[in-house]
Image: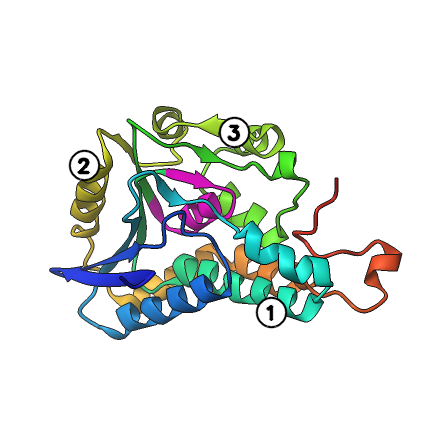
Amino acid sequence: MAIVEWKKDGTVAIMTMNNGENRHNPTWSAKMLEVYNEIIADETVTALVLTSSDPKNFCLGVDLEWLSGPLAEKNWPVFTDWLYQNTEVFKAFIMAPIPTIAAITGHAFGNGAMLAGACDFRFMRADRGYFCLPEIDLGIQFAPSMMEWMRRIMPYHFFQKMLLTGDRVAAPELEQHHVILKACENAEKTLEEAVAFARTFNKTRKNMQEMKNRAYKHVLDKMEFDDPQYFEVDPHAEAEGRLPVFMLTV
């Protein structure tokens, strides 16, 4: 089974992550972009639903086992290239010319929560799974653009609480704060509700794209102008205390 695959349900593309915890590494990022591009190339697709086949997890974020290699070796070019590649995945879902909808069928932690947040809309199962930003406890920092797109999906005070506490939040509370459209009975109902909502869209891609260009300009600006100062590391950076955005700080 491919680590990411997709199928059509009428005019809705269902994109499924099949790699267990669906950890983010270069292989995952490359496959996500490949499948995304296949979907967008099909002009009959009017909405995209992103989900996971794992019974427990939607996405647990960064592949720390892979990451330990470049960090231990101080192989900053590999690390930086991956940061930019992963940002392209997030950007794809934010700026897609069709609505993107996350069917969160399990835990969404760290970059996994960020991935769900990059989608335009979210549904989540209520019987199992948490939405969490554990980076505060891991000594890891977010890129400026990540802060920006997450602030667009929830009240600022709630984002601040998640950011600074690392609390695990379940679907009912997320629904209360409008982070998700609906807390669903179980995983099956979550996907069912997300696809049903996706079917309600039949907007022109041109208008959808321009609407997002204007609505999400502040996110794109952060990606272009602010993120690089945290992604790029020159040979003297470590001595000067300038480390990559995800470098452990504790």
Q: Can residue 230 be seen at all in this image of the molecule?
A: no
Q: CA distance from mark 3 to mark 1?
A: 32 Å
Report the magenta residues as a range: 107-121
* Residue 160, quarter of the rendered image: top right
Where is mark 1, residue-wise? 81
Frontmost residue, 79 versus 115: 79
State the SS at label 1.
helix
Frontmost residue, 211 versus 74: 74
Residue at horizontal 73 percent and vertical 63 percent from the top: 74
Lower sequence index among marks 3 and 1 = 1
- Marks 2 and 3: CB-CB under 8 Å? no
Q: Nearer the viewer, mark 3 or mark 1?
A: 1
Where is mark 3, residue-wise? 158
Where is mark 2, residue-wise? 189
Label 2 sits on what residue type? Answer: Lys
Residue at horizontal 61 percent and vertical 65 percent from the top: 224
Frontmost residue, 182 versus 65: 65
User: In which quadrant is the N terminus drawn?
Assistant: bottom left
Q: Is residue 227 within the magenta segment?
A: no
User: In which quadrant is the C terminus drawn?
Assistant: top right
Q: How is the image coloured?
A: rainbow
Q: Is residue 101 above or below residue 90?
A: above
* Residue 233, quarter of the rendered image: bottom right
Q: How dense is the environment of label 3, judged by Cα within 10 Å: few (below 14), some, or many (20 and up)? A: few
State the SS at label 3.
helix
Label 1 sits on what residue type? Answer: Asp
